Image (spheres, grey):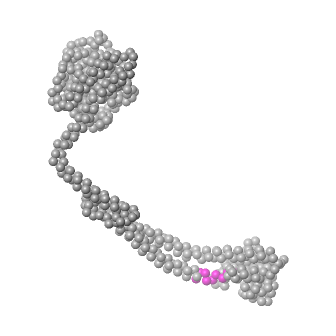
Amino acid sequence: MFKSIKARLTVTICGILLIIFTIQMAANFLFAEQYYVYQKTKMMKNVNQQIIHEAKSTDEDMSQIIKNLDIDNNLDIIITDDKFTPIYTFHSMGAPMMNPQMIKPDFDFSKYPKELYVTEKPTIIMTNMQDGDRIRLLSKIEHGGESYYMVIRLSVKSISTDMKSTNMFILYISSFAVIIGCMIVYFITKQLSRPIEDINNVTVHISKLDFSLRSKDIERKDEIGSLARNINNMSLRLEENILSLTEANRKLEIDYKYMSELDEQRKELIANISHELKTPLAILTGYSEILSNDIPGIDKTFYYETIQDEAHKMDILIKNLLNLSDFENRLFQLNMEEINLEELIEKIFRKNTLLMKNKDIVGEYHSEPCKTVIADPMYIEVAVNNYISNAISYTKKGHKIIIKVEPVEEEAVISVFNEGPNINETNIDKIWNSFYREDKARRRTSQNNIGLGLYIVQSIINAHHGKCGVLNKENGVEFWISLNTVTVQPCKDNDNTLERINT
């Protein structure tokens, strides 16, 4: 019951009304009489001050002034001379102040000592309800060089009875008002909640994909009417869209598997073409800018040859990437020849120095005397470039990339090391898979993703009957390639030396 807006609003507002009513009645019963007495006492003090002030400021008869104050404030004022002989009460009907024969007050002055009349502040005496009066103010007046004593009395014997009657009347009226108020609140909340309940009923049907129900309060000009119209429009459009989607899905289910595979291949093709072409494109762009700036002292022939070489390789790469099945089935042709591995890797390193400088990466190249290998230099360069491209992508500014060529027994080993985070050991075997790409940004994280590049490296090296792999180092990652050698041939007539080239 109390989960509905109508019930909660009704209970809340009625509860507030009841609390206000309770506080009001408690205040009436507890404090109304005291407040009434306080106000009357305050009024008596004001009257006392007026009489004292008038008595001091004039020597004329004070009877009429006192009488007016007496009648206007519904008081009983009694004045005596300095011997407590009464000279004025309201019963004297305005007799002269010095005519005690006509005054018969019903107040005994002698039962209160003179000290109570002569204090700086008037004395207030509260008597019991059994007395004829309940509040008495004792004071002293100076008039015409004479001293007089005054008692101002207020008959409040019926205050308690009157207040009880008043409070009971207020109780009945307030109770009736609370009941009527609760009924009005219930009626108003019912009117307010009815359209909300109607809209809620419509939304419940919509959540069950039942669009047959419509809200009825669309003619209202307020927010609820606007909400009702919007709900109806939403229901209509949802119904139309769901019907369209259902029809489209029914058609798509016929060839869903084929379309899914085709779309996946398209995405993989785009991603991997972009990955494999970014290095030669970067070299072409960088070297073209250098040539266009006509920098003096540069070897233009070297740059032109490099641009032509990279363009030729891009053509071959595009053909190979568009025919990926050749890599998977090893149908691509290798043009095997004797190559000096050190010179080839040094050439590849120099081509990539510009890319390293652009990222403020420290590049180092180390080589040792090596043996000749039989390999296809273009595909070896593709494989090494994939390693270097990945290293540049994953190396932060100011960190190192170290490329080495060194003999290990009867093999020549090419290694590309870059400083950075390690590859997660759980994924280290997956990075060689075709299209393994969980992170499109290709960051080397716990969700490592290398993509097609390493798959192509593995395919090329396997075709050369070599080996490739990756090692997590203390401060980075090292990818390596191992090729079989045939004869000993020193590099650049530099026997038993280590050659180091820094970017």
- 338 lies left or right of 298: left
The residue lying at 28 percent from left, 59 percent from top is: 236
Give whichever of 331, 289 is nearer the camera. Answer: 289
Q: What percent of the width, then of the height, locates residue 435? A: 23, 35
Q: Quadrant of the N terminus?
A: bottom left
Give whichever of 254, 10 is nearer the camera. Answer: 254
Q: Which residue is the extreme one toward the bottom?
A: 101
The residue lying at 47 percent from left, 78 percent from top is: 176
Asked which quadrant contains residue 164, the reply is bottom right
Can residue 481 be seen at all in this image of the molecule?
no
Q: Which residues are magenta?
A: 153-161
Q: Quadrant of the C terminus?
A: top left
Can residue 277 be seen at all in this image of the molecule?
yes
Q: What percent of the width, then of the height, locates residue 131? A: 66, 84
Residue 158 on the magenta segment:
yes
| Residue 454 drawn above or below residue 501 | below
- 60 lies left or right of 310: right
The residue lying at 31 percent from left, 64 percent from top is: 215
Q: What percent of the width, then of the height, locates residue 430? A: 24, 34
The residue lying at 61 percent from left, 74 percent from top is: 35
Q: What percent of the width, then of the height, locates residue 153? A: 69, 81
| Residue 219 drawn above or below residue 73 | above
- 492 lies left or right of 98: left
